[in-house]
Image (cartoon, rainbow, N blue to C red):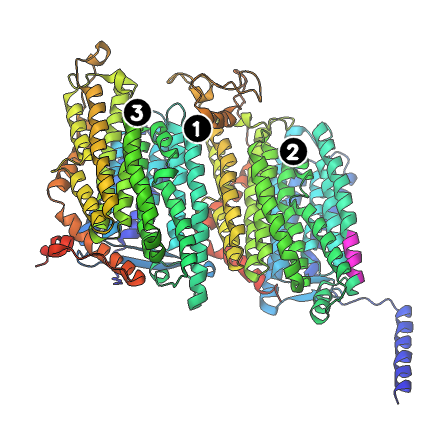
């Protein structure tokens, strides 16, 4: 691991800025709503600025943790403020930083905007905090903290069955975390037993020697928490409710950013900390991932509700991410990480657009929308791009990542890849079908006077569309930053498990990322 | 050779005994060790004397101010004790009956702070209910001195003395509001069951004395470490009876039956006081007796505590879910918390004791703050405790709702509050002691507990009746047929809707909107302090964690 100190504490600022902004907004009691909203967006944009600066400053060829800073937080229980990023987490930070201002600007709340903005900013701080934590307890703190603002966003600004959805979301995730915290502590004590030091530092705990039984138990404890959060197939039942009942801005963040905490956790905890068990149990997780891909597509076909449809399509996409992750090959993992970013962008686009449809028509049932294309061509156009990206059309971002995931899985676990490919077809089926019903045809009388996107809404969706196209056409800058970190991770797994991935002709993806250096 | 020598010894013994008969031997006393108890107890008596000497009933404000001053001086003395113990080490006093160490000082700090906060909360309550005089404060201070004594006790007799001083005052306090029938009912139940458990406790002392020949905690430990009892039935029976007595005091399942009724019946400020102080006192003695005196026998009692802890965690969280009365709900939640503290005891290590102490300390602020809010919402007559009273609180009193939500979330164990650190530390202790399944059960019960804390939060943030924006949502069209008969709409979606019904069957009758409650400023100060401690020490944990840590360093031998 290369630890490079830096003069400017980017990461601490990235966490504290939105947290401070949240507090400031919350305290602005007698200020006009527009001002608090503007301040919220300004804070989120400033955070984005720092996130971009961070990404630019990152050394592309270094797979280790960078911008590391460490301060003792509670010495007697061994917890420290230990943050750092590598090529994997930096893009998740950037993703969060991009999506929060868009969600704040694009999905404003009608009531009590001040509190809404404050919760959103707190959620941003917690999300970024989780992505940059290198101390397991610090990660857990932020991971749990996300629940509080997310819960209040759903319960306070959601739709009809929000109370039910909010509690289901909170309790499910909290239950998963119960195993996570015990797992973390247990691992720390195994490490203490071996070295005499009680620490929760991720890089230190990576080198713990675990018996295979302990490893499997820890793997199950970690995976329980992250599978709920992601959500992975049998643990997903909270997600359609929560995504549907949440307000538009909440759905964007829940599906696009919070879900990534789960998949990111799987990479950081399972692969880094218990590689042997990850290898042993990979077939199980791959099977669940394939089931998620097929089941998500199948159930999505049966939905007439746009939000639920996207929720199930998300389930399928998360299945692809898990597939790439547990393929344990460089291509698969790079594809998985890239898919996290792409899925974030696409889902955010979906939920923003659906939110705007709901504002206009008070419905997201496809059969009540019919023929939306004629009165709202720009809306329909934006929806088409997002949809095609989700389907995985070449030239848009979804294709690159899905291709890498399938290619990577094919290398190591051939038949799982073959079956999962069916899911790609399924995605085309349900999305195009829903699109036809909602947008094509002669508009009903009620739909005919629907307003098209206003300029400010166009301004919000434009960056997403640009990124979707850009990452589809030229993903290299992202891939070449992700690959060194993934290489390091895969090397770590291979070293511990002593199983090596098959060699790829022309050095596979490594050739792409190293091409720039030559 | 030997005989004369023995005789001489006998003579000498006789001579000393004769000398003793002539002069009453007073053991040396270091007054600092018992100064907080003297101040609390003496202050209570002075306050009572003043009340009976002045012609008109003492004004509530004056009584409260005096109580706060007395408690804070005891609080200050406790810090002096802390400095003393930290510089000179632990010591025993009054013929080894009382021990002064970090452990007892921490509990003293806790109890005196809880007393001051409760007095502030009680002020508004007494004014609202039109109760003059200082009796409530006096009784609470007596009870607090009992709790301190329990923490300082180095002898089973002193433990019992503290237990009784603590309890008898609490029996009276429970019945304090004679206008409410629940109050009398709760007090009677508490008194009968409490008297019963005290009897069991005394019997436990007797059996332990019979087995070891001493009631002094250090001497018991000494005896047990130097002797192996071939027939240890007497000792184990004594230990079991002591365990029952402590289990009753700290409300561990299956000795918890009194808790919901007493918590519900007692005047709300007293409930908060009871939850914090009785638990602290009880656990202090529980920890000291079992870990230091019966430490050698830990392989005998640890499995029992293991089972008790699981039962306490599960029953506490499980039964809290179905409560409609907020005080009963918090009563079961306090049982769940007791289960977590038992984790610290079960670990039987320095880490476990430190975690348990931290838990008690942080929990005191959370629970007194929570009950302070409940006191305010309870309204005139202390009646509005159905959770329906909390519906729409966020709209009427956003700040109060926010504070209550924060305190409840802290109790649920949300990060960056002391509530998380309490749970985290007992989990660490438990895993360290190889009780991983227990730790898992505890965390799962915490998730269950989160459900009922959030239920209140949901109600507080639920919109009122007159919300026009959306048609009355399906999940909220419940309780048409009265409580317990939720009307499942036609669109009910199997089990999902059932949960929603359970959740929101608390819709009040239309038009029965709970009015806004004025928050008296002393209560506001108390709530503010509780929230500040809970959040600030959640973000900057080191001072409080180190406090509990240092307190333990001087405890475990």
The Cα–Cα distance between marks 2 and 1, rounded to whole angstroms, is 27 Å
Which secondary structure, mark 3?
loop
Determine whether, in the image, residue A363 is placed left or right of residue B298.
left
The tag on residue A303 is: 3
Q: Main secondary structure of the magenta part?
A: helix
At horizontal 27% and vertical 16% (from top left) the residue drawn is A368
In front: A231, or B223? A231
Which stretch appears magenta? Answer: B202-210
Can residue A7 be seen at all in this image of the molecule? Answer: no
The tag on residue A163 is: 1
Query: Which residue in the structure is indicated by mark 2?
Result: B264
Determine whether, in the image, residue B228 is placed left or right of residue B351.
right
Q: Nearer the viewer, mark 3 or mark 2?
A: 3
Where's residue B177, x and y in %? 71, 32
Whether residues under marks 3 and 2 lie with C-beta atoms below 8 angstroms apart, the answer is no
Determine whether, in the image, residue A141 is placed left or right of residue A364.
right
Whether residues under marks 2 and 1 lie with C-beta atoms below 8 angstroms apart, the answer is no
At horizontal 13% and vertical 40% (from top left) the residue drawn is A472
In terms of sequence position, does the residue under pointer 3 or pointer 1 come before the other?
1
Q: Which of marks 2 and 1 is in front?
A: 1
Q: Give neighbour class at mark 2: few <14, some 14-19, many 20+ (Cα, 10 Å).
A: many
Chain under callout 2: B
């Amino acid at each position: 691991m290369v630890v490079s100190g830096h003069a400017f504490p980017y990461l601490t600022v990235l966490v504290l800025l939105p947290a401070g902004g949240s507090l400031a907004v919350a305290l602005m009691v007698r200020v006009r709503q527009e001002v608090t909203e503007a301040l919220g967006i300004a804070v989120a944009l400033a955070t984005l600025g720092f996130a971009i600066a961070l990404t630019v400053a990152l050394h592309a060829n270094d797979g280790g943790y960078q911008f590391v800073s460490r301060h003792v937080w509670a010495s007697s229980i061994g917890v420290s403020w230990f943050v750092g990023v590598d090529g994997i987490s930096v893009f998740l930070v950037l993703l969060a930083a991009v999506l929060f201002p868009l969600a704040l600007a694009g999905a404003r709340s009608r009531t009590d905007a001040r509190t809404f903005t404050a919760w959103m900013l707190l959620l941003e701080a917690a999300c970024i905090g989780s992505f940059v934590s290198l101390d397991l307890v610090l990660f857990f703190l932020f991971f749990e903290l996300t629940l509080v603002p997310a819960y209040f966003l759903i319960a306070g600004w959601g739709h009809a069955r929000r109370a039910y959805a909010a509690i289901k979301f909170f309790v499910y995730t909290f239950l998963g975390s119960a195993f996570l915290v015990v797992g973390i502590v247990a691992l720390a004590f195994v490490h203490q037993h071996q070295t005499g030091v009680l620490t929760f530092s991720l890089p230190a705990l990576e080198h713990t020697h675990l018996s295979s039984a302990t490893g499997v138990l820890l793997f199950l404890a970690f995976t329980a928490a992250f599978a709920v959060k992601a959500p992975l197939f049998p643990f997903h039942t909270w997600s359609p409710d929560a995504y549907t009942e949440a307000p538009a801005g909440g759905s964007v963040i829940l599906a696009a950013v919070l879900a990534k905490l789960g998949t990111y956790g799987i990479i950081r905890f399972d692969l880094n900390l218990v590689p042997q068990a990850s290898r042993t149990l990979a077939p199980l997780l791959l099977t669940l991932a394939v089931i998620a891909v097929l089941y998500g597509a199948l159930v999505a076909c049966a939905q007439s509700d746009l939000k639920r449809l996207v929720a199930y399509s998300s389930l399928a996409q998360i299945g692809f991410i898990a597939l790439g992750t547990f393929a344990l090959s460089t291509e698969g993992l790079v594809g998985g990480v890239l898919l996290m970013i792409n899925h974030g962008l696409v889902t955010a686009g979906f939920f923003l657009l659906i939110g705007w449809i709901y504002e206009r028509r008070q419905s997201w049932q496809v059969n009540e929308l019919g023929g939306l294309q004629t009165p709202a061509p720009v809306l329909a156009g934006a929806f088409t791009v997002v949809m095609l990206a989700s389907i995985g059309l070449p030239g848009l971002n979804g294709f690159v990542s899905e291709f890498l995931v399938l290619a990577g899985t094919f290398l190591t676990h051939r038949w799982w890849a073959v079956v999962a490919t069916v899911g790609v077809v399924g995605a085309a089926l349900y999305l195009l079908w829903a699109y036809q019903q909602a947008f094509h045809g002669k508009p009903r009388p009620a739909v005919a006077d629907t307003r098209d996107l206003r300029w400010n809404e166009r301004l919000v969706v434009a960056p997403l569309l640009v990124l979707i196209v850009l990452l589809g056409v030229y993903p290299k800058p992202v891939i070449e930053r992700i690959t060194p970190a993934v290489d390091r991770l895969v090397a770590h797994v291979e070293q511990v498990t002593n199983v090596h991935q098959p060699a790829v002709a022309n050095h596979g993806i490594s050739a792409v990322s190293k091409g720039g250096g030559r | 050779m030997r005989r004369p020598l023995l005789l001489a010894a006998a003579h000498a013994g006789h001579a000393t005994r004769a000398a003793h008969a002539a002069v009453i031997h007073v053991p040396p006393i270091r007054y600092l060790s018992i100064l907080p108890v003297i101040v609390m107890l003496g202050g209570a008596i002075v306050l009572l004397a003043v009340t009976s000497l002045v012609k008109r009933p003492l004004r509530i404000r004056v009584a409260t101010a005096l109580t706060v001053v007395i408690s804070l001086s005891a609080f200050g003395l406790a810090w002096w004790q802390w400095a003393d113990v930290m510089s000179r080490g632990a010591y025993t006093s009054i013929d080894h009956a009382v021990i002064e160490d970090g452990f007892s000082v921490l509990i003293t700090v806790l109890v005196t702070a809880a007393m001051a906060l409760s007095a502030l909360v009680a002020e508004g309550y007494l004014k609202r209910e039109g109760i003059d005089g200082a009796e409530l404060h006096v009784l609470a201070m007596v009870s607090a001195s009992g709790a301190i004594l329990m923490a300082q006790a180095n002898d089973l007799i002193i433990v019992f003395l503290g237990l009784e001083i603590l309890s008898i005052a609490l029996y009276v306090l429970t019945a304090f509001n004679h206008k409410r029938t629940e109050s009398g009912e709760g007090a009677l139940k508490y008194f009968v069951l409490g008297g019963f458990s005290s009897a069991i406790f005394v019997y436990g002392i007797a059996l332990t004395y019979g087995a070891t020949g001493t009631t002094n905690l250090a001497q018991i430990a000494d005896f047990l470490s130097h002797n192996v009892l071939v027939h240890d039935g007497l000792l184990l029976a004594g230990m079991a009876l002591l365990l029952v007595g402590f289990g009753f005091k700290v409300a561990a399942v299956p000795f918890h039956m009194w808790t919901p009724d007493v918590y519900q019946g007692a005047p709300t400020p007293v409930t908060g006081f009871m939850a914090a102080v009785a638990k602290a006192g009880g656990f202090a003695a529980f920890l000291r007796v079992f870990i230091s005196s019966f430490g050698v026998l830990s392989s005998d009692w640890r499995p029992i505590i293991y089972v008790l802890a699981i039962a306490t965690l599960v029953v506490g969280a499980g039964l809290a879910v179905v409560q409609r009365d907020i005080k009963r709900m918090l009563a079961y939640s306090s049982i769940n918390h007791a289960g977590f503290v038992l984790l610290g005891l079960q670990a039987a290590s320095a880490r476990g004791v430190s975690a348990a102490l931290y838990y008690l300390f942080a929990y005191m602020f959370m629970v007194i703050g929570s009950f302070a809010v409940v006191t305010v919402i309870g309204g005139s007559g202390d009646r509005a405790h159905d959770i329906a009273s909390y519906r729409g609180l966020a709209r009427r009193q956003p700040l109060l709702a926010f504070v209550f939500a924060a305190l409840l979330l802290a109790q649920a164990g949300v990060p960056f509050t002391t509530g998380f650190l309490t749970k985290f530390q007992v989990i660490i202790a438990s895993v360290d002691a190889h009780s991983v399944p227990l730790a898992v059960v505890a965390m799962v019960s915490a998730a269950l507990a989160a459900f009922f804390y959030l239920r209140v939060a949901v109600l507080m943030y639920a919109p009122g009746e007159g919300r026009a924006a959306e048609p009355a949502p399906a999940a909220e069209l419940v309780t048409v047929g009265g409580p317990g008969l939720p009307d499942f709409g036609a669109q009910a979606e199997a089990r999902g809707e059932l949960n929603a019904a359970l959740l929101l069957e608390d819709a009040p009758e239309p038009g029965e909107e709970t009015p806004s409650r004025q928050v008296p400023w002393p209560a506001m100060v108390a709530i503010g302090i509780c929230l500040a401690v809970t959040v600030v020490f959640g973000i900057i944990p080191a001072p409080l964690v180190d406090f509990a840590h240092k307190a333990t360093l001087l405890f475990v031998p």
